């Protein structure tokens, strides 16, 4: 489902070239839930951006949903994202001028599917926001906004979901609730989940945990909880 | 698959996104800017279109027709037949001088015979008692009747109903003429005495018109479709090898042409500025919209939208928006022009023709061109937003960045200006002006740059906080200063031009403008006439000797005029149609227009009326060389500068003249600018005293007689029967009417552009508030007080306003210099007070708008602001 080989990302800075990721090889299976953990600046979000086709690598290969990302241009990557990828971000990334319902409808409309309203309403109901459909993002709490973002991520039945620090802006209790919803929908839709976090507790709920340090894979372990599942 | 979902889905998404953006307030600024563009352009175009027609109709009253054909003999019958065939209304008049007799006396009158349909435009005002108010009638006298101007009746001791003799026929005095529409037209034949109007059928019986008689035929034509009039004019020109010319009011009366040309110039300039200001507002709106949409696009991209699709969506959103703006703006434009016309109704006495579709088309085209030039580039540049921005806020699109949108905007502005003005020179000059402003702004930004030596916000002191903010936002501030400067500059140019134009018109015909020209005065009569006026307490003016002269050689060679401008032959200054002296030139001043020079100078190599004097005539100015004054020596000559240009003359050139079959040479001592529209004696050529005095001359003078003194004319003519007196009251009054209407129109256009400018300023200040909101929310969170923030914002806006004001003043004076010297043919003078008022105005307006908007910054809770921008 997702595979990288020799993935390297360098960026130019005023003090010379800075290596953010170096020689990353990894493989994520269909339906697998993988957490990428590491300290701030370890390259987690960069790796997520590369795997999701939001950015391009300096060298190395990425295969996503059976397609070789490194051989595609931005237009082709956008089409692939529309077809196969959903996102949940730390900063929610809802469109402020749209209501909760409209935010969820947007990817369905962009895809040209019918019944966007019904499907969005259903998803909002499932994340517990049936009565908040017509609220704008700035009228919702952080936890509620993230739940709208989760509903949006599942709106097009994308087989792969990338989540970047989904609880990073939330308190522990709210974060816990949001994660429960995320995992529940993940199971239900049978999506592959790639989750970037530095929350060890959250990482342990995934099937596998990849540790990054200074841009390299520093280790990998299967989750205990997952093993018990 | 998104791309496969088709056009319908694209439209649906674009429509929904637009609607949601609209509801969220994102599109309002851009939409209102577009509406403003369409409203002002449509409003002004409608107004100009209808006003121009109205002014032409109104001024057509001065001709008693839309078009006139002059000829010294009856015009070919085919011309009238063709006019009738084309559905024109026609009439004819025949003017001649004649003696009118009663049982008790006689008098030289300017007789005018008119056909049944006269007048085609305007009305004749008649009454039953001389010197009383009259009532309008739409016809001339019936056969057998003569209508007389007031002062004829006491002179001949007549009353309405009495008999008057003209030549060999006897007519009944049917009415007293108070006014006739085309009284100011024609030459001496029409103005050499008081009017006696009779029916065309009675002319033969008078037996006055003999072979060689000085007569003037005028054929009048009228039609509501101006285009058909133009076609007819062309037909006459083509069919008769240029021997006959149909003229409109502009060619017939250069004073009116002058006023109309200037009014049109001002209206054109007004709409140019309105478009530029609207373009600015659109650019600002689009910029703000696109800045707020970086995140939006990044999210759309993560959701799988391709760049192409994003481009299409934004293009569709803008087109939908423009379509709505055109609908709303056209409606509002109609209301605006209706409002203006209502305000003008008091002075516009004519029924306005309904507006055509053209102004609406102009408004719509403007909206789409503005959108293409100003809005689409930054919006399409949104396509380049990297999707990774969802993870890293600091990433923005870079490929289009700033330069290409600017290039589009500049190209769009140039096309719009060119389209509106149809004037490549004016467009080039405006472009150069804008480029100059850009250069100034770069210098200003360099100054900002040079002074930004220290780091940090200096948040302890409002002044320092403001100045560091000015420096930190240098790039945005330069843009903002440019918008403010261009707006203030536009308003200053239009405001000052309006004031100068109106002042110039008032100066053109002051209260004491002479209303009588006396010609053919002999040297012996001068003192007696002066004594006559002194006795009757009338202020007499200087007497100018008049001699008919012709330039034979320039430095011994045949004169070689540079190519003449204009088309057709001479126009209608008062004496140019003068059959009494067909070779004479316009000794009396009579205006110029866009091609006035061409009209005035045609035939300049033929005879000119020249004079000699120690004194520089009033309103004349020496432009090169020196005036001889009292220390004059014979042998020098002063030349009108346009005439000098035409003959490519230089100071020191020797001209040889033929005067009364004698040859006289004189050296050019100076060139003069002459004000031809002031209704005063003016001359192309003035000699120094002693040069041609011995060749014999008659004298010319002017005088002003108030209404109550008009009867003195009868005494004057009785006492000096050989002099020719020309009355120009009617012409002066008609010019003043036109000028007052044009003044009202100019005031209203200025008000409209002022409103557009105010909206742009407001939009610009609001657009800059976003980042200030965020920064000040952080400052307040960190403990900065309301007073500190408000004061610092006030200082920052005042500073930007002052800089914009200085640049605007520089630009306005530069622009006015060009416009007044080249377009409006006025003398340019620096407006010293503006050098204080411009910066003060900039500071006050921008500070007031800034402070008003910044209240929101300090009144919104920092948390709300910070949450909004996360």
Image: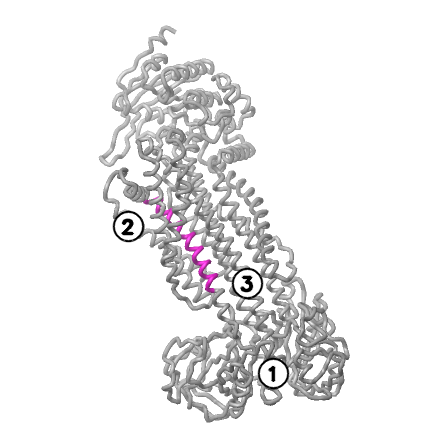
* Kind of element beneath mark 3: helix
Q: Nearer the viewer, residue B326 or B182?
A: B182
Q: Please, is residue B274 above or below residue B75 in the view?
A: above
| Residue at which label 3 appears | B742
Q: Please, is residue B278 above or below residue B109 in the view?
A: above
Q: What segment is highlighted magenta in the picture?
A: B474-500
Disc number placed over residue B713 in the picture, else none: 1
A58 on left or right of A117: left
Sequence-first tag of 1 and 2: 2
Q: Nearer the viewer, residue B130 or B725?
A: B130
Q: Is residue B787 visible?
A: yes
B448 on left or right of B520: left
* Kind of element beneath mark 2: helix
Sequence-first tag of 3 and 1: 1
| Residue at which label 2 appears | B447
Chain of residue at mark 3: B
Circle nearer the viewer, 2 or 3: 3
Mark 2 crowdedness (10 Å alpha carbons): few <14, some 14-19, many ≥20:
few
Mark 3 crowdedness (10 Å alpha carbons): few <14, some 14-19, many ≥20:
many
From this viewpoint, which residue is outermost toward the top?
Answer: A228
x then y, percent, for residue B710: 61, 79
Chain of residue at mark 2: B
């Amino acid at each position: 489902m997702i595979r990288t080989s020799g993935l390297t990302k360098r960026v130019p800075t005023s003090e010379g070239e800075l290596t953010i990721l170096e020689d990353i090889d990894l493989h994520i299976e269909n339906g697998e839930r993988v957490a990428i953990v590491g300290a701030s600046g370890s390259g987690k979000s960069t790796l997520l951006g590369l795997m999701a086709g939001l950015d391009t690598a300096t060298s190395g290969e990425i295969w996503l949903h059976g397609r070789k990302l490194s051989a595609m241009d931005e237009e082709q990557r956008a089409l692939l994202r529309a077809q196969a990828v959903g996102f949940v971000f730390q900063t929610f990334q809802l469109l402020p001028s749209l209501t909760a319902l409209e935010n969820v409808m947007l990817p369905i409309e962009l895809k040209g599917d019918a019944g966007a309203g019904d499907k969005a309403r259903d998803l909002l109901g499932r994340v517990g926001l049936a009565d908040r459909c017509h609220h704008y993002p700035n009228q919702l709490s952080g936890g509620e906004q993230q739940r709208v973002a989760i509903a949006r991520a599942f709106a097009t039945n994308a087989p792969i979901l990338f989540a970047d620090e989904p609880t990073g802006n939330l308190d522990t209790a709210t974060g816990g609730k949001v994660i429960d919803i995320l995992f529940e929908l993940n199971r239900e839709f049978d999506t592959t989940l790639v989750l970037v976090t530095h929350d060890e507790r959250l990482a342990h709920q995934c099937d596998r945990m990849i540790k990054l340090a200074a841009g390299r894979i520093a280790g990998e372990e299967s989750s205990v909880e997952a093993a018990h599942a | 698959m998104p791309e496969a979902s088709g056009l319908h889905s694209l439209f649906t998404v674009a429509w929904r996104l637009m609607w949601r953006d609209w509801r969220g307030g994102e599109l309002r600024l851009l939409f209102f800017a577009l509406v403003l563009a369409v409203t002002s352009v449509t409003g002004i175009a409608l107004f100009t279109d209808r006003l121009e027609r109205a002014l032409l109709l109104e001024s057509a009253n001065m001709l008693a027709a839309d078009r006139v054909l002059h000829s010294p003999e009856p015009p070919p019958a085919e011309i009238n037949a063709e006019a009738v065939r084309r559905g024109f209304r026609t009439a004819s008049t025949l003017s001649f001088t004649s003696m009118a007799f009663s049982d008790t006396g006689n008098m030289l009158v300017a007789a005018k015979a008119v056909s049944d349909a006269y007048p085609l435009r305007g009305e004749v005002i008649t009454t039953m008692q001389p010197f009383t108010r009259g009532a309008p009638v739409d016809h001339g006298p019936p056969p057998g009747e003569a209508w007389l101007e007031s002062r004829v009746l006491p002179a001949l001791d007549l009353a309405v109903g009495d008999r008057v003799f003209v030549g060999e026929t006897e007519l009944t005095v049917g009415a007293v003429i108070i006014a006739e529409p085309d009284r100011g037209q024609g030459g001496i034949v029409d103005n050499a005495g008081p009017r006696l109007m009779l029916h065309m059928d009675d002319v033969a019986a008078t037996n006055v018109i003999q072979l060689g008689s000085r007569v003037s035929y005028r054929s009048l034509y009228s039609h509501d479709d101006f285009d058909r009039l133009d076609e007819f004019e062309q037909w006459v020109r083509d069919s008769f090898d240029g021997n006959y010319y149909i003229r409109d009011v502009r060619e017939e009366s250069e004073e009116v042409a002058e006023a109309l040309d200037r009014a049109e110039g001002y209206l054109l300039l007004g709409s140019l500025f309105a478009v530029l200001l609207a373009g600015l507002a659109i650019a600002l709106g689009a910029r703000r919209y696109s800045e707020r949409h970086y995140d939006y696009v990044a999210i759309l991209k993560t959701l799988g939208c391709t760049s192409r699709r994003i481009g299409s969506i934004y293009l569709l959103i803008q087109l939908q928006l423009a379509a709505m703006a055109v609908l709303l703006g056209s409606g509002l434009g109609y209301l605006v022009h209706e409002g203006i016309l209502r305000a003008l109704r008091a002075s516009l006495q004519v029924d306005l023709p309904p507006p055509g579709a053209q102004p609406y088309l102009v408004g719509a085209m403007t909206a789409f061109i503005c959108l293409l030039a100003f809005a689409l580039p930054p919006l399409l540049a949104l396509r380049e937003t990297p999707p990774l921005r969802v993870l890293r806020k600091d990433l923005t699109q870079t490929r289009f960045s700033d330069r290409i949108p600017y290039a589009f905007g500049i190209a769009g502005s140039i096309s719009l200006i060119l389209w509106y003005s149809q004037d490549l020179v004016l467009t080039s000059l405006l472009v150069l002006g804008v480029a100059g402003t850009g250069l100034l702004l770069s210098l200003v930004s360099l100054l900002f740059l040079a002074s930004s030596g220290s780091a940090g916000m200096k948040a302890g002191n409002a002044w320092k906080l403001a100045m560091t903010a000015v420096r930190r936002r240098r790039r945005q501030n330069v843009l903002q200063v440019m918008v403010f400067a261009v707006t203030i500059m536009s308003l200053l140019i239009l405001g000052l031009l309006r004031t100068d134009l109106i002042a110039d018109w008032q100066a053109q015909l002051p209260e004491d403008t002479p209303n009588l020209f006396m010609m053919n005065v002999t040297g012996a009569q001068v003192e007696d006439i002066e004594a006559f006026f002194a006795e009757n307490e009338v202020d007499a003016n200087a007497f100018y000797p008049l001699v008919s002269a012709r330039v034979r050689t320039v430095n011994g060679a045949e004169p070689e005029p540079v190519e003449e401008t204009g088309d057709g032959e001479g126009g209608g200054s008062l004496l140019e149609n003068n059959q009494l002296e067909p070779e004479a030139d316009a000794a009396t001043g009579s205006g110029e227009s866009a091609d006035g020079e061409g009209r005035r100078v045609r035939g300049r190599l033929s005879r000119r009326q020249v004079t000699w004097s120690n004194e520089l005539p009033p309103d004349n100015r020496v432009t090169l060389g020196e005036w001889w004054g009292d220390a004059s020596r014979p042998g020098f000559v002063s030349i009108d500068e346009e005439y000098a240009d035409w003959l490519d003359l230089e100071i020191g050139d020797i001209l040889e003249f033929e005067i009364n079959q004698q040859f006289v040479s004189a050296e050019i001592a100076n060139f003069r600018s002459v004000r031809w529209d002031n209704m005063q004696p003016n001359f192309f050529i003035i000699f120094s005293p002693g040069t041609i005095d011995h060749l014999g001359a008659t004298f010319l003078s002017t005088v002003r007689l108030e209404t109550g003194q008009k009867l003195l004319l009868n005494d004057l003519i009785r006492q000096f029967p050989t002099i020719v007196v020309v009355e120009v009251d009617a012409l002066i009054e008609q010019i003043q009417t036109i000028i007052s209407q044009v003044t009202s129109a100019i005031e209203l256009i200025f008000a409209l552009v002022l409103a557009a400018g105010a909206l742009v300023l407001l939009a610009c200040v609001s657009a800059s508030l976003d980042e200030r909101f965020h920064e000040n929310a952080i400052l307040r969170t960190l403990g900065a007080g309301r007073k500190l923030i408000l004061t610092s914002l006030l200082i920052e806006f005042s500073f930007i306003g002052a800089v914009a004001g200085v640049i605007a003043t520089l630009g306005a004076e530069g622009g006015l210099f060009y416009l007044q010297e080249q377009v409006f043919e006025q003398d340019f003078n620096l407006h010293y007070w503006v050098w204080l008022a411009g910066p003060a105005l900039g500071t006050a307006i921008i500070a007031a708008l800034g402070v008003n908007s910044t209240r929101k910054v300090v009144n919104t809770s920092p948390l709300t602001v910070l949450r909004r921008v996360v």
